[in-house]
Amino acid sequence: MPTVAFYTLGCKVNNYETEAISQLFLNSGYKRVSFDEIADVYIINTCTVTNTGDKKSRQIIRRAIRKNPEAIICVTGCYAQTKPNEIAQIEGVDIIIGTSGREQIVDLVNKFRKTRIPITYIKDVFRDVKFENIPVINYESRTRANLKIQEGCNNFCTYCIIPFARGKMRSKDRISVIKEAQNLVDHGHLEIILTGIHTGGYGIDFENYDLADLILDIEKEVKGIKRLRISSIEISQIDDKMINVMKKSQILANHLHVPLQSGSNSVLERMNRKYTTNEYLEKINEIRKVFPNIALTTDVVVGFPGETNEEFTETYNFIKNIGFSELHVFPYSRRSGTKAAKMPNQVSEVTKSIRVNELLTLSNQLAQKYINQFKDKVIDVIFEEEFSDNKMYLIGHAANYIKVKALANSAKIGQKCQVLIKNTTYPVTLGELI
């Protein structure tokens, strides 16, 4: 039985796609092994959202080549899509396949095995109008499951390379989403995370059907699902219809990840983000009127070209005023091919590093403040894994994304349990099963 090993860099979408590709190999008679083992085929699913992603991807490719020089090395994902020639220069890479057409990946491996001629298979993502539907049936090592429902982005923020790696927005059809969600639940995945490159844009290519409609249909038709989470949604996509669906839903997580990127209007304009801080704040206030304890997380980019001390201070103060429950902070990464790469007044790496650290400190403070309000309260937790700290604990997440550990039998993994929060220390709170 031939063996295949995977390494995934980057986002939830990449993690989903690795599992989908793995299923293709398993269906073709392969055995999946750890990336640290000797394998016949290595699949590296790459990321290119930052320079660090590119660098890390190259490191992992070379690591696989060293591990087994006789193996077939296949590189896929966003870095493969945007810079195939750069990857082709790495001696030992056999197959390069971008972000579409991966239903053929096993055939390409078999073709290379026969011919030993390197293969580069890169399609024009802007001509792709169909969603690449390779379903995931099961995640062997997870209780939470990503379900990719959407591909591509039409926004073209000036700093972002992803539209060039993923193409235009397109959506997975409703019937396929429902079927895949049911399969995942049947395999023990009680929480499903709806994910995509621009998840909130689901249905833009359909007539009169959007993400809010899909959520209603999943809740109505998928038997046994306990929790549904949206991986990310733009502020403009949280309209009255979505808020009404959130109010009615019994399974939707009390958590939204709403990218901000900057709290300065002048920076938002240079980024080509299509909202102002006032519009963002008004929508957040509207959401909190309906869901006072909702967890709100966000993405922030610091050190965008021309970002002054004053603009960074505006961002810092805006974030503090909003009171997010957690921040994902990224230093601006210059990506060739984007408008921001050509902008004047690029910010130094030292300045970016200082600003990142300031926001990470603020993130910790905000997270602790958010968690504190749940002390001595009962919340629902789905346990995901064991954790040993002199005693054996289980760790899982609440609907509001609080990470909780509690003394419990491993049989509780994958189950939804009521937990009394006893200690609210960030990042892992201590709870007690009731």
Image (cartoon, rainbow, N blue to C red):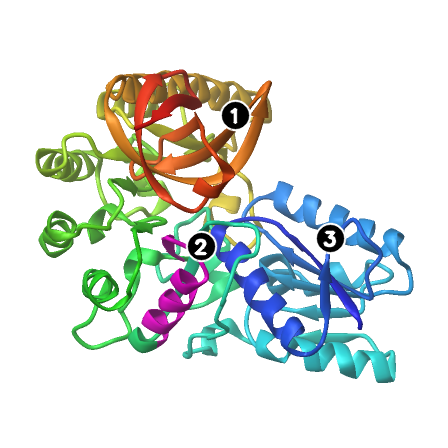
Which disc is residue 331 wearing?
A: none
**Looking at this view, is 286 or 175 the one in front?**
175
Would you say residue 338 sits in the magenta stretch? no
Position above or below: 78 against 411: below
The residue that disc 2 covers is: 145
Q: Is residue 241 left or right of residue 171?
A: left
The three-letter amino acid code for the residue at tag 2 is: Ala
Which disc is residue 34 wearing?
A: 3
The three-letter amino acid code for the residue at tag 3 is: Ser
Label 2: state its secondary structure: strand
The residue that disc 1 covers is: 352
**Within the image, what quadrant is residue 372 found in?**
top left
Residue 152 visible at all: no
Q: Is residue 168 left or right of residue 320?
A: right
Mark 2 or 1 closer to N-term?
Answer: 2
Would you say residue 178 sits in the magenta stretch? yes
* Image quadrant occupied by the N terminus: bottom right
Label 3: state its secondary structure: loop
**Looking at this view, is 221 or 305 the one in front?**
221
Mark 3 or 1 closer to N-term?
Answer: 3
Q: Position of residue 107 (x, y in %)?
A: 70, 82
**Residue visible at 24% across and 69% down?**
221
**Residue visible at 36% across and 73% down?**
179
Q: CA distance from mark 3 to mark 2?
A: 20 Å
Mark 3 or 2 closer to N-term?
Answer: 3
